[in-house]
Image: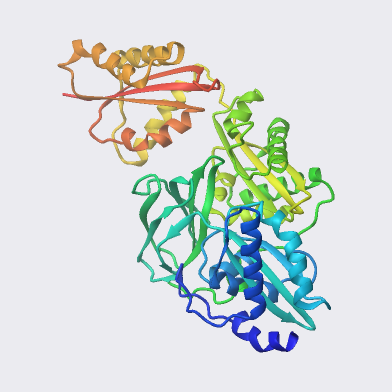
Amino acid sequence: MKALLFVLLPAVAFAQPAVRYNDAPPKRARPSLVESIDELVTKVAKRERRTEPHPDARLEDAASEIARLAPERGPPPNELVQGALWVHGIVEPPPHLILATMGSGGEAELLHELADDLPAVLSQGRYSRVGVGLATVGRETRVLVALQESFVELDPIARAQPLGGLVLLRGRLRESFQRPEAFVTTPDGKVLTRSQLGGDPTHFGGTFRCGPDKGRYQVEVTGEDRFGATVVANFPIWCGVQPAMTAQAAAPAGGSDEVSATPAAAEQAVFKLLNADRARARLPALQWDDKLASIARGHSSDMQLHGFFGHVSPTTGSAADRTRKAGVDAMLILENVARAFSPGEAERGLMNSPGHRANILNHDASRVGVGVVFDPHAKELLVTQLFSKPPEKWDVHTADDLRRGIAELRRTRKLKPLERDVVLDDLAQSTAREIARNGMSAQQGGKRIEYGLQSQEGRWSAVRSLFAVVAGASQVVDSLKDSLADGTVTHVGLGVEPGRRKDGGSGLFVVIVLATRR
């Protein structure tokens, strides 16, 4: 047995890195033990009426590299696993791993042990791929079985791209996933959102430019199913530089991990780490919120008890549903969920995911709660981070703050300041009041303003109305800056009224009327 393994392992463990993601590797001879495990996985999946994973040579190469580099004790670090996938051309999130050591009983004993473990493992996911890696480390023969889910078909993409070139993201979501979105983290850590991926609810196509800076760009594609938004692909593109050729070189930035003695200690560790990440991005620290932590803890427990992983619970709904039921009033609710073996691994994994990173580094969030539970079956932590921004208190100065924000925006754009108009002010304020108190729609509000200005047709050559529901005046200027910086506009009318949104939370209802004098 061992002599055979020594002959075959070098071809498996040191397979050449992929040139492109999602390229099919050439066919090659496979060790008999690998084929036996593949057959066992298929047999157990059929018997248990589970999805039958198909052997994937790329996953085999990644599994062999992970087995060779894994520590003597404990699970392989997530960074190592992720790096091995990328080097061998796999874009999907990390697989479920079963790491075993060949004992004195040889292949028969190993297959027997796997047969006992596989039913429970296969019940935890919709695995479509299997890759079996073999590695000899010292006198030890390691066997790593990787089972991976795949919910996206992505056209092949070169791992290394020329600086300034366009990277095409084209493919389709599989299974029940819809509404694709894409995110890109640039080498300086900023997150770009590509929320409008062209195509139907499942097929998509979009591009991003490789640059202007050289370095590593992290690309992520998400889709939504009944459990909410899920990462279906996450991979780096090396722009204007050589791509990583080994798992260790490709691995995201790691660090030392401390195992927390209790879930409460893990929560505080994650809280400390996420604020450290915000500090590195020169953002203010988030304030700990006990109520948010309780909600987050409940969601982590819900995922553990009911065997799912996602943002939408079959029993409690979405993060917005959970916070509303708990009586939390907020204009912003964001949620991250993670599975990891330590707080450090959880936070690093979230920061290496562009979409989750954007939540941690959100400029508007001011509070956070972290909830951690221990999953005894997977022997890992289930982590939920819940971010919020409470509504700002409205007072008589809010409208003045908004006017100053508009004036500053136009000054920085080197545009003339807008003149205040009493008639436009009165019409904007009365319309904001109707929307906030009586539920008037924005469309109805626009018609109301048009009707109110009929007697002033001779004054204006053009009139446009803007509507927003926000937590504070600063959000209005930022979200409507292109319209507010229109150089043809000469006058403005402004209305601000506090009220309750349809979901029960409070907010500021803002109406802005922009007009151009004849």
Residue 74's image quarter? bottom right
Q: Position of residue 52 (x, y in %)?
A: 57, 59
| Residue 280 in the image, given as x and y percentages of width and height | 61, 53
Residue 231 rendering spot, x and y as whole percentages: 53, 51
**Residue drawn 51% across and 43% down?**
225
- 116 or 436: nearer the eye? 116
Q: Place residue 411 in its image quadrant.
A: top left
Image quadrant where one finds the C terminus: top left
Q: 70 or 516: nearer the eye? A: 70
- In this rendering, the answer to whether 429 lies above or below 127 is above
- Is residue 65 at all visible to an observer of this figure? no
Q: Quadrant of residue 39?
A: bottom right
Residue 209 appears in view: yes
Residue 271 against residue 295 in the figure, above or below: below
Q: Is residue 275 left or right of residue 391?
A: right
Asked if residue 373 lies left or right of residue 408, the reply is: right
Q: Quadrant of the N terminus?
A: bottom right
